[in-house]
Image (cartoon, coloured by chain):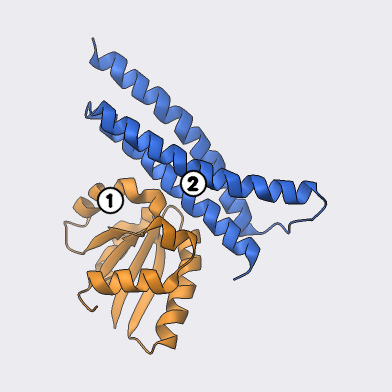
Chain colours: A blue, B orange
Amino acid sequence: MDDLEQKSFEIISSVGYAKSCFMKAIQLAYEEKYSEAQKAIDEGNEYFTQGHIVHASMLQQEASGNHIMMTLLLTHAEDQLMSTELCKTMANEIIRLYKKVGNK
Amino acid sequence: MKKILLVCNDGMSTGFLTNKMNEYIQSQGLDYEVRAISEMTLDREWENSDCILLGPQIGYLKDSIVSRIHNARPVEVISPIDYGRINAKGVVNQALKMLGDL
């Protein structure tokens, strides 16, 4: 396993787990378990940041002139990163919405 | 031969892990087969397996998957640490424990 594969997998694994946390948070908010939902969001944020740090270090490496070879696995990792970022934003909004509806 | 099924969104990252796990199984002379599928094809694939491991990215679907397969196979989420490190040995051992073989 080379370094590029390892880093791609680190991103896929951390942001993948983060996405699962964000989806779990939505489910918990639906059940009106808001503090548990917040815990799931916090856990998701932690894992998301881990993946983001790996990706940022790769960007810095490329910016410093050390070219990174594009592979399908890395494309997949970036795809997961993007979709999880969207999932995170939407999870926070959906939880706000459930709270608003629940308080009526 | 017992069959271990890995499930994720698209079967790509688990496909990668599958190769490493099968290599490890062969190197140890064990009698198991690992396959990766996408979550969308689970309903027609699960009967052809002995245990099911989910990628961490679909961990939130565990409860619904257990009911989709009528609780007929053990289902666990792969540890995100083993997954991120592509720790084939760790994931194989997790499956063997689920199957009661370790």
Label 1 lies in what chain?
B
The N terminus of chain B lies in quadrant: bottom left
Q: Residue at x 25, y 60 (%)?
A: B75
- Is A95 placed left or right of A19 in the picture? left
The C terminus of chain B lies in quadrant: bottom left
Q: Residue at x 49, y 63 (%)?
A: B85
Residue B12 location, x and y as percent? 50, 60
Residue occupied by mark 1: B62
- Is B25 placed left or right of B97 in the picture? right
Q: Residue at x 41, y 26 (%)?
A: A92
Numbered disc 2: secondary structure: helix
Tell me which amino acid carries mark 1. Lys
Residue occupied by mark 2: A15
Tell me which amino acid carries mark 2. Val
Q: Are marks 1 and 2 in contact (CB under 8 Å)?
A: no
* Mark 1 to mark 2 CA distance (whole Å): 18 Å
Residue A100, picture quadrant:
top left
Numbered disc 1: secondary structure: helix
Same chain letter for marks 1 and 2: no
- Is B80 placed left or right of B42 in the picture? right
- Count of all numbered marks drawn on residues in the image: 2
Compared with B49, A98 (above or below) is: above
Closer to viewer: mark 1 or mark 2 = 2
Residue sitting farthest toward the top: A104
Q: Callout 2: few (<14), some (14-19), or many (20+) C-alpha neighbours within 10 Å?
A: many
Label 2 lies in what chain?
A
Q: Callout 1: few (<14), some (14-19), or many (20+) C-alpha neighbours within 10 Å?
A: some
Residue A33 location, x and y as percent? 23, 29
- Is A70 placed left or right of B68 in the picture? right
Compared with A39, B86 (above or below) is: below
